[in-house]
Amino acid sequence: MEDQKVLIIADFNQRTANGITIRSFFKTWPRTKIAVCDWSGSIENSYVEEITDYYILGKTEVCFIWPISLISKVNESSKFRKDNLLRAKSKTNSDVNLTYSRSRRTFINLLQYTGLSQVRKKVKLSTELRNWIYDYKPDIVYSSFSTIYEMNLLLKLKKEIPVPFIIHFFDDVQKSIKSINIINYFWSSRIKKKILNLINGNVLCLTVSPKMEHEFTNRYRKSFYNLFYPIDPELFKKNALSFSSKEFNTSKKKLEFTFVYTGKIDSDTIRPIKVFIKAIEDINKYKHYNINFKIYSQYHLNAWIEGIGEKVVKYFHGKAEFSRIPEVLSQADALLLPLDDRPKSVSYTKLSMSTKAPEYMISNRPIFLLAPKILAVSEYLLSNECAFHSDINSSIKTNIIKFIENSKIRSQIAENAYYMALKHHTIESVGSRLRTLINNHLSNSYK
């Protein structure tokens, strides 16, 4: 079947994890058959060479609810086609703003705790957006979401556009509110109702892990299909092939060993990173160890200090653009993948697959997994012997020492992970599966 014209309604920002991931999903799709409607941002950050149709949602479609509207504003809506794209794409790229004042971060945390972040915006289907979509004439609509207000817009579009939809779940949105039980129950029930309405009818439902596929198929009584996060092996090939596992030599005064982490700081990662730092600092007091830890993150140092404390400054090495990630990972003897084991965190992360996992796997560096075994990412890595596991408890120091002293284990899990990534996570293999799922869905739709 010939590739169809797809309208992508999602975060398409080249500087966010989800944006980079969605770009990778459609890397093998003909770019002349892609149009992008980004939830927010700018054309500079959404632009991809040869894709010529863009719509950036703004105040024509979206507004903040009161009183959030007193301190936050929505940018103007903007659409781009060949006639004005050349001028727009020539602008200087702007950074993702992940730096906030303490009072603003406190306010954002309050919104997340109460669940009001799910409805902090109101949406409407504007005439401009409707006309832009009709002019493009999509054959299928692909979207991912994380909030109720985004689902509200997708529900409006489903009624308006008589084509099949693809809804891609990256996280368990229904479990995204981490608050007291009565608040959790209220939002979980409301989100579930919205999801059921959204996936009803001619909709192809995708997930990012086998565990999520199984759970959602049972929970929502509809077939879901897993699609792994993709990576481009060409970006990692040069650095990945240069790896050799460091041997532990007791004749040396100090064992030099470097862990690297390239990720976020939030409620799901703060505690395990704290525990890890405390463990390596204790280990370094022994005469044979000098364990280094390097953090690279899009999040500003202030956010790290607020979450971990002042001591994190010595480990923080700033931001690494996505293009630099292969080089950064190649500097490591091992890579840290941390996730919290507290119930409220586990309820949200249990079904997700970390975007870091395939990047770590293709780097040919051993993964030190500091996370509960019940998580989807843990089950996947451990069942395929692609990581060394440690719980977040008193045994962590023993596990770190065992890990760094056993070069054979490290070499084996690095090799296993590398070949699993080549088999299941390349842009080509993931793109081929996506194309097959879409074509099968369309064939069934038109029967």
Image (cartoon, grey):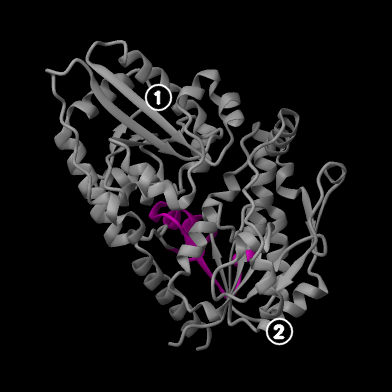
Q: Please state if 49 lies on the left or on the right of 230 as rendered.
A: right
Quarter of image, res 375: top left
Q: Which residue is mark 1?
A: 276
Q: Magenta segment: does it hold 282?
A: no
Total count of labels:
2
41 lies above or below 130: above
**Which element is circle 2 on?**
helix
Q: Which residue is mark 2?
A: 135
- The quadrant of the picture occupied by the N terminus is bottom left
178 lies above or below 430: above
Please give the range of residues in magenta.
198-225
Q: Position of residue 127 (x, y in %)?
A: 82, 75
Relative depth, front residue between 49 and 245: 49
**Kind of residue at badge 1:** Phe
Quarter of image, res 167: bottom right
Numbered mark located on residue 5 in the image: none
